[in-house]
Amino acid sequence: MTTVIVPVDFSETSLNAARYATNMLSSCEASTVILYHGYSKASEESEIADRLELLQAELSKSSKVKIELLSCHDSDFIEGLEKTARHRNANLVVMGIKGKSAMSHAFFGSNTLKMTQNKVCPVLVVPEHAKFSKMDNVMLASDFKDTYNTTPSAPIKAFLDLHKPKLHVVNVDKDHYVSLTEKYEAEKQSMKKLLEEYNPEFYFMRIYNVDEALDMFANDRDIDVIIAIKKHHSFMQNLFHNNRTKRLSYHSKTPILVIHE
């Protein structure tokens, strides 16, 4: 069973994430989407419940997935969402993010990025204009360092099993040449063994700008989701911890799945 939590504040960004999640899971059996809202005032409880029910009715018209509603009195959004994810054994949290120039990014954008730092479960970051239509091509970005021990294969496989897409494993390094070094070849074989049932294809790009390389590959290969593994003190941590995080998340047209090692 797949349990997905979608926090909504009723902004268009969060509503789009809810639509994306329910459409993504529409054909997946034994899946549940939990629409979650944390309110700060007890007086809001009744109104929030009504608005969630209206959203549930809207989403049910275009998706057959089971939709549950959950509203809680929370003084801290991230703390409340993390607690809910743990209690409900969530497999995934789906959150929207809006362009950097928009005023409304201040709350939902920053909290989405904060949630990607949380290890409770994978987080799928959905750009404001992303619409789910298919899951044919998924890109796994990897630094190819100790892949066998640091690649979280279980959550990656759980996500891939939703639609069985074609898997593209990508590494970007300015020092790549015509042929792989023995070290990279060994790491490639480790990754291939971990994900062999998905017949992964491997790509090694000799480009200096990592985030631009990932964007370019995603566009050229019609990638539907980018999977990023967040490691400690690594290339992927830097990618999802500083200005590169903001750039990729705010400006990418492709949803990004952040999974901790």
Image (spheres, helix red, strand yellow):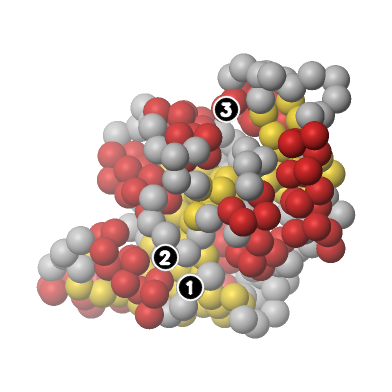
Disc with the residue nearer the chain's start (1 vs 2): 1
Q: Earlier in the sequence, mark 3 or mark 1?
A: 1
Task: Tell which of 12 and 211 is nearer to you.
Answer: 211
CA gap between label 3 and label 2 equals 25 Å
Examine the image and state in which quarter residue 156 appears: bottom right
Give x and y (percent) for residue 92.
52, 65
In depth, the one of 6 and 161 nearer the eye is 161
Q: Is residue 197 left or right of residue 85?
A: right
Q: Which mark is residue 160?
A: none
Q: Which residue corresponds to the image point at 59% horizontal and 53% vertical from the top-left?
A: 150
User: How far across and how far down the image is residue 4, in percent?
Assistant: 52, 69
For marks 1 and 2, give the one nearer the viewer: 2
Q: How far, Cα to Cα, is label 3 from label 1? A: 29 Å
Residue 247 vs 189, above or below: the answer is above
Which residue is label 3 attached to?
211
Few, some or many residues within 10 Å of mark 2 (<14, 14–19, 20+): many
Q: Of the residues shown, which amino acid type is indicated by label 3?
A: Asp
The residue at the point 13 percent across, 68 percent down is 41
**Rendered-image quadrant of the N terminus:** bottom right
Give the image location of residue 68, x and y in percent: 46, 79
What mark, if any, has residue 120 been given in the picture?
2
- Residue that lies at the very extreme toward the front in this rendered image: 182
The residue that label 1 is drawn on is: 90
- Whether pointer 1 and pointer 2 mark residues with C-beta atoms closer than 8 Å, the reply is yes
Q: How many marks?
A: 3
Quarter of the image for residue 106 reads top left
Mark 2 element type: loop
Counting from the top left corner in percent of width and height, residue 25 is at: 64, 68
**How dense is the environment of label 3, judged by Cα within 10 Å: few (below 14), some, or many (20 and up)?**
some
